[in-house]
Image: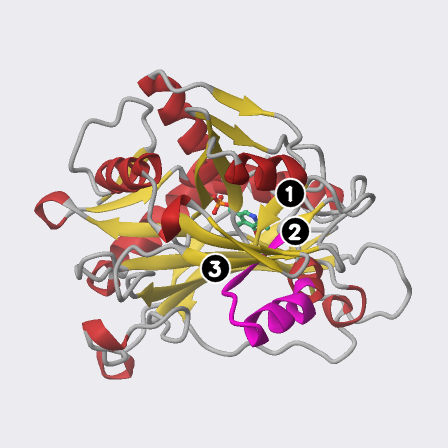
């Protein structure tokens, strides 16, 4: 269907290229590479005007439907510099497939997956000098789709923009791989079953900000969300999925519609099972977690997501009480997952699941 989509490269003059930030100045998502990918969709033409072009502002009117009704979806993945200076993407197809699943839910057009994987490979190759080689650093990639039609009726837009921007990011743990302190929210909810919690759509993140701020004010880095109906079952932590190790088994909430199906979550489940660790995808009540911590069967807690890969949890604050997990230390399974997943992502070890895509 999209075989005739032509992609052009609008080369920018060398003098317009940006200075690359120093390795210790990267931060997260504040510096952007020289180029981006951009294309438009309309009912009449489908995807068109596809181009790799300078990363720069584009015109969009104040009536664009994204500003009013929030049709916006995005993805997050990374390019890693690894063995022999080569650059690798991690499961990029899965990101475009997930974007497409979200597009259906949000009444937006789907993108051609294979074509987008190839575009991304070309874009990253073109910008390969932007992939940092410092320990833990990477090139964060943000594919995004927005409704661009200027109209105020509440209905799916007839015009969309899709773009891919890229940002060199520093190590998620500049001070090392240390457990985080988590605030369990029994007041606000992130998503409901039947809603859009399983879609990376902009509004979910806007809705989470207020609770995140409250948690930060209390000295906690992330919010652990419970189910919206009973505030009883664990859902996610911040923008990561969550795992508990209880009596040598990993337990993680099932994908029931309110939770984002993380690619890191899937990778962790697959790797753990491959090692012979039992993994249960089942509803887990916060009371069960607290009780297991009390009787010593809770061995560790960690989050999984593209940004931090694995994020160990050292403390859970719930209903006014602080519960220290595993003595506030990183658990052994979290540490092993972090090491092995990074080794796969950077091409330093075998890739038994065929997850990495080499660029160039
Ligand atoms: C992106 C995201 C995740 C993690 O997904 P990955 O594919 O592993 O990066 C988890 N929860 C939420 C809410 C997210 O937005």
Whether residue 309 is visible here, answered yes or no, is no
Image side of residue 171 versus residue 280, left or right: left
User: According to the image, label 3 marks what residue?
Assistant: 181
Q: Is 273 left or right of 190, judged from the image as shown? A: left
> Magenta segment, which residues?
208-224
Element type at marker 2? strand
User: Which residue in the structure is indicated by mark 1?
Assistant: 235
Q: Is mark 2 within 8 Å of ligand 1?
A: no
State the residue at coordinates (17%, 59%). 133
Return the x and y of residue 162 as percentages of the image width and height.
Answer: 57, 58
Magenta stretch containing residue 223, yes or no?
Answer: yes
Query: What residue lies at 52% left-to-right and 49% top-to-bottom?
Result: 240
Query: Is tag 1's residue or tag 2's residue first in the polypeptide sequence?
Result: 2
* Residue 158 vs residue 199, the one in the foreground: 199
- Residue that extends furthest to the front in the rendered view of this protein: 295
Q: Secondary structure at mark 3?
A: strand
Q: Earlier in the sequence, mark 3 or mark 2?
A: 3
Disc 1, disc 2: CB below 8 Å? yes
Seen in the picture, residue 359 relative to 147 is either above or below; the reply is above
């Amino acid at each position: 269907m999209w075989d005739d989509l032509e992609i052009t490269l609008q080369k920018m003059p060398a003098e317009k290229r940006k200075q690359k930030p120093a390795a210790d100045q990267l931060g997260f998502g504040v510096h952007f590479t020289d180029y981006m990918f951009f294309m438009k969709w309309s009912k009449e033409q489908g995807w068109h005007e596809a181009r790799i072009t300078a990363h720069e502002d584009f015109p969009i009117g104040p009536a664009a439907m994204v500003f009013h009704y929030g049709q916006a979806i995005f993805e997050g993945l990374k390019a890693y510099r690894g063995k022999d200076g080569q650059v690798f993407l991690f499961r990029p197809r899965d990101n475009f497939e997930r974007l497409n699943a979200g597009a259906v839910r949000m009444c937006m057009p789907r993108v051609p997956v294979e074509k987008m994987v190839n575009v991304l490979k070309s874009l990253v190759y073109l910008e390969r000098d932007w992939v940092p080689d410092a320990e833990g650093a990477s090139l964060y990639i943000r594919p995004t789709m927005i409704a661009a039609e200027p109209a105020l009726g509440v209905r799916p837009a007839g015009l969309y923009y899709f773009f891919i921007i890229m940002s060199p990011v520093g190590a998620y743990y500049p001070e090392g791989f240390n457990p985080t302190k988590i605030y369990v929210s029994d007041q606000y909810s992130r998503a409901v079953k039947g809603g859009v919690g399983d879609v990376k759509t902009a509004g979910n993140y806007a809705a989470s900000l207020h609770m995140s701020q409250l948690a930060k004010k209390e000295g906690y880095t992330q919010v652990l969300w419970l189910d919206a109906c009973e505030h009883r079952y664990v859902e996610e932590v911040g923008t990561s999925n969550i795992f508990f190790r209880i009596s040598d088994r990993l337990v993680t909430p099932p994908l029931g519609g309110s939770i984002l199906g993380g690619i890191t979550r899937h990778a962790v489940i697959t790797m753990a099972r491959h090692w012979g660790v039992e993994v249960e995808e089942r509803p887990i009540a916060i009371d069960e977690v607290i009780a297991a911590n009390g009787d010593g069967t809770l061995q560790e807690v960690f989050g999984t997501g593209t940004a931090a890969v694995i994020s160990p949890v050292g403390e859970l604050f719930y209903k006014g009480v602080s519960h220290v997990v595993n003595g506030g230390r990183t658990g052994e399974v979290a540490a092993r997952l972090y090491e092995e997943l990074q080794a796969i992502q950077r091409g330093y070890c075998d890739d038994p699941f065929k997850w990495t895509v080499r660029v160039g």
